């Protein structure tokens, strides 16, 4: 269904291991730096920066790291110039994949992305080939523990959210991009965000077979682990029983 991303849910479950490797911090520092460079260092006037800062806090990033990243973006500290590039492609089973990157070397990034797609039965596509299958929306994940579902849902919807999803061990709040900042402000004082950001969510999904799922998940994992990857999504659905079987192998 629209608004749901199987990869986002899978990644959520393994996010702690990723954070331990420091990759989450690296991605967030890049995003905070670019957001500050593009829109200034005042989070109340810069929705992208506010979202990036909230994502940093959700990942337990130290406040000093966040401040330094902002200063690099505003030019108060020396920093790196990053280029935003989006890659589109297909994975096993015809699954559409959308990959957002931030890089200081587009040739390195392009070569790495091309290598991973080729190694795991995927192929790159022309710009616009799959982007139309996704819709960018604001997403906030909040763990269920200690949270009253009805109160959270009412607060989110009253402040501009358009959907509220029970994802098992956490609640997902979805909002239009232009309403996302007001939803964030309404919820951030009361709830601890597990994750927050603007995501490209599939409007429809493709169910893949067990054989395709194994290769597809490996492709997604390798793309996620690339140095310059910021956000990754795909329009697949894998039945839970297949996921459980693959996880046990």
Image (cartoon, helix red, strand yellow):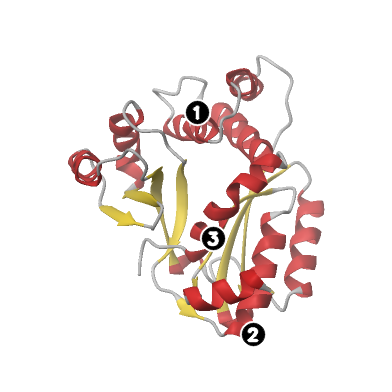
Which residue carries the number 1 mark?
39
Residue visible at 49% across and 70% down in the picture: 235
Q: CA distance from mark 1 to mark 2?
A: 45 Å
> Quarter of the image holding residue 123?
bottom right
Q: Are marks 1 and 3 in contact (CB under 8 Å)?
A: no
> Quarter of the image holding residue 225?
bottom right
Which residue carries the number 2 mark?
211
Q: Nearer the viewer, mark 1 or mark 2?
A: 2
Mark carried by residue 18: none
Residue 29 in the image: x percent, y percent? 64, 32
User: What is the quadrant of the N terminus in the image?
Assistant: bottom left
Q: Nearer the viewer, mark 1 or mark 3?
A: 3
Helix, strand or loop for disc 2:
helix
Residue visible at 51% across and 23% down in the picture: 40
Residue 76 in the image: x percent, y percent? 65, 14
Number of residues whose C-alpha sits closer than 10 Å to that of mark 3, classed few (under 14), some (14–19) or many (20 or more): few
Which residue carries the number 3 mark?
10
Q: Earlier in the sequence, mark 1 or mark 3?
A: 3
Residue 55 visible? The answer is yes
Asked if residue 47 is positioned above or below residue 121 in the image, the reply reads: above
Residue 71 in the image: x percent, y percent? 62, 18
């Amino acid at each position: 269904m629209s608004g749901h991303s199987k990869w986002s849910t899978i990644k959520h479950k393994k996010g702690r291991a990723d954070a331990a490797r420091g990759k989450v911090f690296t991605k967030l520092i890049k995003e905070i730096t670019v957001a500050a460079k593009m829109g200034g260092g005042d989070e109340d006037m810069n929705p992208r920066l506010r979202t990036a800062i909230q994502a940093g806090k959700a990942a337990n990033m130290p406040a000093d790291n966040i401040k330094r990243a902002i200063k690099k973006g505003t030019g108060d500290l020396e920093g790196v110039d990053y280029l935003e590039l989006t890659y589109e492609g297909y994975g096993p089973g015809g699954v559409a994949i959308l990959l957002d990157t931030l890089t200081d070397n587009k040739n390195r990034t392009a070569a790495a992305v091309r290598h991973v797609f080729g190694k795991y039965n995927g192929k790159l596509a022309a710009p616009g080939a799959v982007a139309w299958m996704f819709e960018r929306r604001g997403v906030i994940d909040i763990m269920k523990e200690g949270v009253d579902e009805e109160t959270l849902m009412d607060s989110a919807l009253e402040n501009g959210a358009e959907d509220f999803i029970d994802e098992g061990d956490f609640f997902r709040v979805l909002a239009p991009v232009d309403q996302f900042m007001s939803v964030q402000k309404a919820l951030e004082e009361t709830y601890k965000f597990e994750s927050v950001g603007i995501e490209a969510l599939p409007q429809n999904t493709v169910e893949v077979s067990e054989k395709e799922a194994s290769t597809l998940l490996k492709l997604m994992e390798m793309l996620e682990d690339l140095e310059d990857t910021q956000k990754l999504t795909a329009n697949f659905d894998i039945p839970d029983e297949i996921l459980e079987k693959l996880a046990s192998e």
